Amino acid sequence: MNSLKRGEGKTKGNIKKKDFYNYYVNNAKEKLVEKSTYNKFLKDLLDAFSKAIVETGLELKLNKLGKIRVRTKELHFFNKEGKRAKSVRVNWKDTWDYWFKKYPGLTKEEIININNKPIIYHDNEHTNGEFYEHYWDNSTINLKYKSFYNFNASRQYSRLIAKVVKDPNRKTFYYG
């Protein structure tokens, strides 16, 4: 098995943004707004919430659906069984630089086909070995089958966390 080829996405939602608009159209008692206006409003609203969560450390309470916030966790390289922990992420830039030095003259495709290559992982030295993630705290909600739901923030907001954390004059800190 080659772990460098991208596979099919693991999270497949069956409710999309258009479904919310269709629900709005079918149930609104007031005058309807255009779909483009609705989409712009929704984008601006989610953008404002996301920036407030990341840049100011806001904990957003979603009424009966719990809270969304940024959480910090200590980075562990190995789990209790001595295997590599899931929280450790591959540093692809440094890994590819290392592979190009270790296997000179080989193309990217030839390097991909080599088995058991050494991989370099992020050590998060700039954050004292901590990593940050968007976290949906659903521990206090009463929702049937809540373990089947998950929250995945878009990449742009994950990159916003990285920008805040790497700032040398950082004013926002998160907790576990």
Image (cartoon, grey):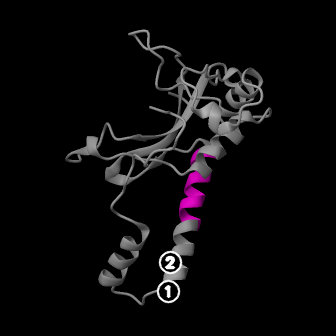
Secondary structure beneath dot 2 equals: helix
Q: Disc 1 marks which amino acid?
A: Glu
On the image, numbered disc 1 is attached to which residue? Answer: 34
Residue shown at 65% from the left, 46% from the top:
160
Q: Which residue is mark 2?
A: 38
Q: Is residue 176 left or right of residue 126?
A: left
User: Which residue is more in the foreground, 93 or 128?
Assistant: 93
> Does the stretch in magenta take in 108?
no
Residue furthest to the bottom? 31
Q: Is residue 43 left or right of residue 160?
A: left
- What amino acid does circle 2 point to? Tyr
Residue 14 appearing in the image: yes
Camera-nearest residue between 29 and 93: 93
| Quarter assignment of residue 136 | top left
* 120 sits left or right of 176 in the view: right
- Answer with left or right where residue 3 lies relative to residue 23: right
Q: Is residue 52 magenta?
A: yes
Q: Position of residue 132 (x, y in %)?
A: 57, 33
- The image shows residue 28 at horizontal and vertical percentages of 34, 83
Distance between the alpha carbons at the discs numbered 1 and 2: 6 Å
User: For the magenta stretch, what is the residue range?
Assistant: 44-54
Q: Does residue 173 show up?
A: no
Q: Are marks 1 and 2 in contact (CB under 8 Å)?
A: yes
Residue at 58% over, 49% down: 155
12, above or below 41, in the image: above
Mark 1 is surrounded, within 10 Å at the Cα level, by few (under 14), some (14 to 19) or many (20 or more) other residues, namely few
